[in-house]
Image (spheres, rainbow, N blue to C red):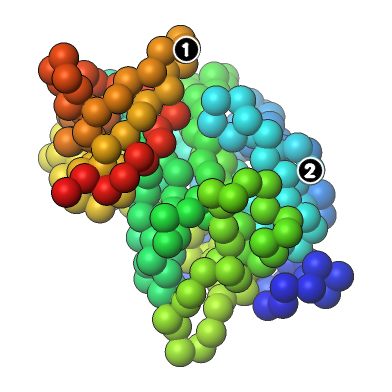
Amino acid sequence: MTDDPTRRPPFEAAALVAAFAEHPDLVVELLEQAPSTNALAAARAREGAPDGLLVVADHQSAGRGRLDRTWQTPPGAAVTFSLVLRPSVPPGQWPWLPLLVGHNVAKALLRLGYDAAVKWPNDVLVGGLKVAGILVERVETPQGPAAVVGVGINVATTAEELPVETATSLALADCTRAAGAPGRTEVLVAVATAIREAFDAWQAGGEEATARLRTSYAAHCATVGQDVRVELPGGGVLVGTAVDVDPDGRLVVETSAGRERVGAGDVVHVRRHG
């Protein structure tokens, strides 16, 4: 891997096929360029694409993030993909899916040697800076509702290419791996398979699996224990200390007026509590 944008190689289709050969529950569709892998994956889902279709773009030119933000990366610099899943869990369990994805992206990066954690609900941080964004969308299809899981990870992005000072990339982060920083194919395989395996276990485990997910997520969430400022979708602001994640996946914030539960919002870590 190199920090020179002119020397970042594209994905190789043959290498991806070989890398996913041991994971038949993931079927890869590789595109040289796409405006949005989520939009393409949603269209494939409506056309009947099976659970496990993985749409990978070597370069995504007009991606979307949470709260309708745009997300773009230079060619060869990021891992951008969308995974089609067809959950059979009860509707009340669906809000946990974005948290499951963020949690397991962070766990995959931890296994690769990075100081990764998830910021509620599903931004992935390395060294306290955002390295990955996630957007999970529900799509109605003739075969029933599907979930399109979009993930974008800054891998070889340089400091000059990052959109904000609060972002980072794997290339810029310290990595303790003896073999050095991983390439994009290794990151893609590690993250996509981690999501697939966690999703399957969650589906099969019922309410007990969701309870275990809640415990694990809260224990490893960088937001819990932090003083936070939450910018709410309706324009309000909530200030307090994040103390827990409730059974519905909402962030529990201790404020001067009591405990509030937040189902959506942009969280800013003010400082580490304590």
One can see residue 272 in this view: yes
**Pointer 1 with pointer 2, Cβ within 8 A:** no
Which residue is rendered at x = 45% and y = 44% of the image? 123
Q: Left or right: where does residue 56 sit relative to residue 35? A: left
Quadrant in the picture for residue 228: top left
Q: Residue furthest top?
A: 234
Closer to us: 100 or 113: 113
Residue 178 vertical position relative to residue 50 in the rendered view, above or below: below
Q: Which quarter of the rendered picture does the N terminus lie within?
A: bottom right
Quadrant in the picture for residue 21: bottom right
- Report the label total: 2
Residue 200 vertical position relative to residue 235 in the rendered view, above or below: below
Residue 153 vertical position relative to residue 7 in the rendered view, above or below: above
Residue 70: x and y in percent read: 68, 34
> How many residues crowd around disc 1 within 10 Å: few (fewer than 14), some, or many (20 or more)?
few
The residue under label 1 is 235
Residue 8: x and y in percent read: 78, 71
Which residue is rendered at x = 51% and y = 88% of the image? 179
Q: Left or right: where does residue 136 sit relative to residue 91? A: right
Which residue is rendered at x = 68% and y = 47% of the image? 163
Q: Residue furthest bottom?
A: 178
Which residue is rendered at x = 47% and y = 77% of the image? 175
Q: Which mark is residue 256?
A: none
Give how far apart the Cα atoms at labels 1 and 2 are.
29 Å
Amino acid at pointer 2: Ser
Q: Residue furthest right?
A: 6
Closer to us: 255 or 188: 255
The residue under label 2 is 61
Q: Secondary structure at mark 1?
A: loop
Q: Earlier in the sequence, mark 1 or mark 2?
A: 2
